[in-house]
Image (cartoon, grey):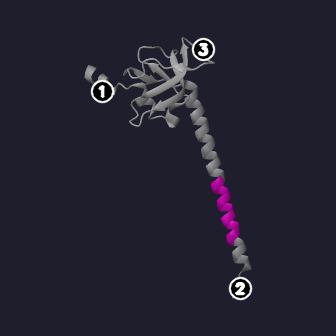
Amino acid sequence: MRQTCALLAKNAFELLSRQPSHGLGSKLSRTTWTDDCYWTISKVRLSPDGKHGIAYGVLTWRGQPQRPDAPTKVAGPLKKVWRLVRDEGSSQQQQQWQSLVADTLRRERQAAKAAADEAGAAAAAEQPAS
């Protein structure tokens, strides 16, 4: 078990490199911290291999942002003790966004089908009867 945990452990850059926009806006926490202690990433420079770099962000400790106006360098990003913090609200927002996208696509398909039907009817009306 201990060996498996060691293999699953990731450093901060390995996690950020797999996120959209290299993790900008994501929340990183150490495995020993509680969910109300995390870094909100505001700037990342990754190396080409995605395992090294520099990350800046705002530390939120016990629910209180520390120096939110001046992002600071993330401490200890190469240690393999990092995890992504998921917001409960973000999953709900993501579901709402997905349903909005699905509704928009459905409306676009209906509009395209209606336009095709109108074009077919207009073409049939223009052809002389033989």
Residue 12 location in percent, x, y? Answer: 43, 25
Which mark is first along the chain, 1 or 3? 1
Magenta segment: does it hold 116?
yes
Tell me which residue sits at (54%, 28%) in the image.
Answer: 43
| Side (left or right) of 57 relative to 48 | right
Q: Which residue is mark 1?
A: 7
Residue span colored magenta: 108-120
Q: Nearer the viewer, residue 80 or 94?
A: 80
Vertical relation: 39 (above or below) 101:
above
| Side (left or right) of 116 relative to 43 | right
Vertical relation: 32 (above or below) 89:
above
Tell me which residue sits at (39%, 31%) in the image.
Answer: 51
Vertical relation: 115 (above or below) 107:
below
Q: Amino acid at mark 3?
A: Arg
Give me the disc on residue 67. 3
Vertical relation: 21 (above or below) 36:
below
Which mark is first along the chain, 1 or 2? 1
Kindly state the secondary structure of the residue where label 3 is placed. Answer: loop
Q: Which residue is mark 2?
A: 129
Frontmost of labels 3 and 1 is 3
Quadrant location of the N terminus? top left
